[in-house]
Image (cartoon, rainbow, N blue to C red):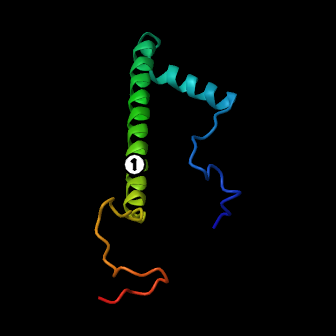
Amino acid sequence: MLDPKTRPNSHGSAPRLGIVEILVLLIVALIVIPPENLPEVARALGKVLRELRLASNTVMRELGSAIEEPARTIAPPAAAEPKPGAAKTSAPSGPDGAAEPS
């Protein structure tokens, strides 16, 4: 098994293309796609990539909010403060803190 530090592309980013790889892709594209159709194909590819990026952003936002939502519900509620004017439940006490006889 490869060490995660040395494994290529271990952080999930797109692979990096050099000049040679880009030239090979362009030559293959010219062979497979006729030159008169290249603008149309490039436009369609741009639309597909834009839709994929938008979908990816939407999924990431949804996952982020789904992860944050349980964290909010797990947090303990704030201590309830007594309402003003609420009756005391303990017996009244005298000046020394002891309960007064009835």
Q: Residue 4: horizontal and vertical position, in percent?
A: 65, 60
Work out whether 32 lies above or below 34: below
Front-most of 72 and 27?
72
Residue pushed farthest bottom? 101
Q: Using the image as rendered, state which of residue 23 and residue 32 is in the foreground.
A: 23
Q: Residue 74's x, y, as percent?
A: 40, 64
Q: Measuring from the top left, give residue 97's x and y in whole percent.
A: 47, 83
Residue at image coords 40%, 33%: 54
Residue at 63% x, 25% y is 23
In the picture shown, does residue 32 fall above or below 36? Answer: below
Work out whether 25 lies above or below 99.
above
The front one of 74 and 76 is 76
Q: Give the quadrant of residue 60.
A: top left
Q: Is residue 54 left or right of residue 15?
A: left
Q: In which quadrant of the rendered image does the N terminus lie? A: bottom right
Residue on which the image places disc 1: 65
Rendered image quadrant of residue 52: top left
Q: In the visual, does 55 lie left or right of 10?
A: left
Which residue is found at the position 33% from the left and 82% from the top?
91
The residue lying toward the viewer, choosing from 4 and 89, is 89
Quarter containing the C terminus: bottom left
Q: Position of residue 76 (x, y in %)?
A: 41, 66
Q: Residue at x 61, y 53 (%)?
A: 10
Amino acid carrying mark 1 in the image: Ser
At mark 1, the secondary structure is helix
